[in-house]
Amino acid sequence: VKAKHSLNTSRVKTETARTGFRGTLGNKGGVTVRMQFYDSTICFVCSHLAAQRDNVHGRNFDYHSILGKTAFSGEYETEWEFRGLSQQKYFNESFNNQSTPTYGILDHDIVFWMGDLNYRIAVFVPTEEVFKKLGTKQGLEYLRECDQLTIERKKTYDGAFYEFKEGITDFYPTYKYEINRDEYDRRRAPAWCDRILWRTQDDENDEVQLLRYNSSHILMSDHHPISAVFRTKIREINREKHIETFKSVNAELIKFENGEQKYHPQIVISSLIVNLGNVQFMKLQSVQISVKNNGHVLSYIRFVHKLGETSPFPSWLKVEPAFALLKPGNSIDITFKSFININTAQSLAAGRSALEEIVILRLEDGLDYFLQVQGNYCKSVFGTKLSSLLDRKDNLRQNNLPNIPIEIWRIIDGIIKKGGLNPEIANELFLTPGNERDIAVAIECLDSGEPFEDTCSPQSLIQVLQTFLQALPVPVVPLQSILIAEKESNCGTIREWPHKFISSLPPINHDLFLYLMSFFREIFQAQLSHVLNNANVSQRLQEQARAIAIA
């Protein structure tokens, strides 16, 4: 910080977060420095995330772990309008009653995140292909699209750095170089491991502008360092006007305390019924309502939990913002977002819950408003009991196949027909993530009965299969069978305990387990094989399935 700005730099704090070896070692993790610069809060994070090209999940986990472990304690700074004001009688107590408040990385006005993030080129691009693409402008553009961080930033729920921005990596990959030589190590696929990203609370006003983003050819490491230059807008409060306005507001509040009706807070809500419409499994649905302050004083609104509950909202519902301070005449849009995950789908399928909820919007020093949130859950096969799936008329007994849900057969048949058992694809089947859109469309197709799209990849379908199996209320292998397997494997012979384990499976689970094992065996054989004919594999799987059905 330059000397002329030093007096306006305050509340400097640092924190560290370890993520190496299950969060105990500091070889991986992040160091965070935060400060108040004039009247803006700025946070800098430097991190080293999990290595290995195929370990995208590990890097995402480290990112979320750093966010979760980093917390600063001190003066509550959520509402900058109240900073620096004296503790007067009419100071809003909701911002002052917290004895040891905490705030995290994403609560700052501006966040800069940098370091060796270790994201690589997606594993479906072979190493030699990466080197070939480096030679052309079109090739570099292709590699940028296949960059793991770019892919993960586009994911809403299970990715990382979703709300962060980054400039174009208009420079060659910064890893991995021969030390003291300006040449890549040919044993590793080059990658943009070193990155600088930023995030702001206000996206609309372009508080941060990137002026330069490049790398430097310093040869002492296997990484080339990168740098970025930014221009940022910093908030500075006019203290005289701020205090004058504050005193004026307090004078108005005194009138309110003396009972003048026009000084009671008042709001108008566009609708007390929030209709989410048709809600589908793992598909985000959102609806907005507006709240307007039509009174003469500040209105502080917030959602509160009902008696006996700990959260204002059920697990399937998220509301943004959860609180707001409205000046007279101002209004705000409140967004209600529903997302049906596996747990909620199981509860809905079993009839234990419904998409109906009453949420309470409290107007401080005013009324409580009860909003009815409702939606129509489109019945899904995901989360439905195995017995209920098999009781339908469209199960596969009529085709002399095992008594398995038709959805399982459709997914596996689709994987095979799309080349999922070709050796090259099979090797990457569980390593390369599927396309987020294709996965969502395939889930819809399973519920509607429509065929899968031609563009849907085997990797996307294998993730749909995983989601389907995870959503079963009772797993394919129940806990009782697992306990039997553990007991028999310790005391029985290798010939005896597998038979006892298979025999312990309930009848409705037995055929499905064998069918899945037959499929996974084909994948394993494809991974080891140099030549494999998809048509023969599909036929062999059908024959094995018929043999199981006859048995």
Image (cartoon, rainbow, N blue to C red):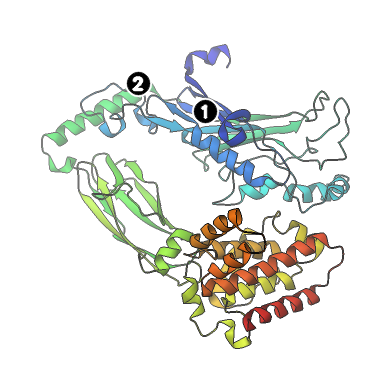
Q: What residue is pinned by disc 2?
A: 240
Q: Secondary structure at mark 2?
A: helix
- Image vertical order of residue 395 relative to residue 428, above or below: below
User: Foreground residue, 460 or 362?
Assistant: 460
- Give the image quarter of residue 468: bottom right
Q: What residue is pinned by disc 1?
A: 42
- Image vertical order of residue 43 relative to residue 438, above or below: above
User: Foreground residue, 513 or 149?
Assistant: 513
- Give the image quarter of residue 528: bottom right
Q: Residue furthest bottom?
A: 398
Q: Residue furthest top?
A: 3
Please name which of the two marks, 1 or 2, marks the residue nearer to the observer: 1
- Image vertical order of residue 93 relative to residue 149, above or below: above
Residue at image point 20% right, 26% down: 89
Q: Which sits earlier in the primary sequence, circle 1 or circle 2?
A: 1
User: Foreground residue, 145 or 72?
Assistant: 72
- Evaluate whether residue 296 shows in this view: yes
411 relative position to 302: left or right: right
- The location of residue 295, given as percent across then percent down, is 23, 45
- Give the image quarter of residue 349: bottom left
Q: Marks 2 and 1: in contact by CB < 8 Å?
A: no
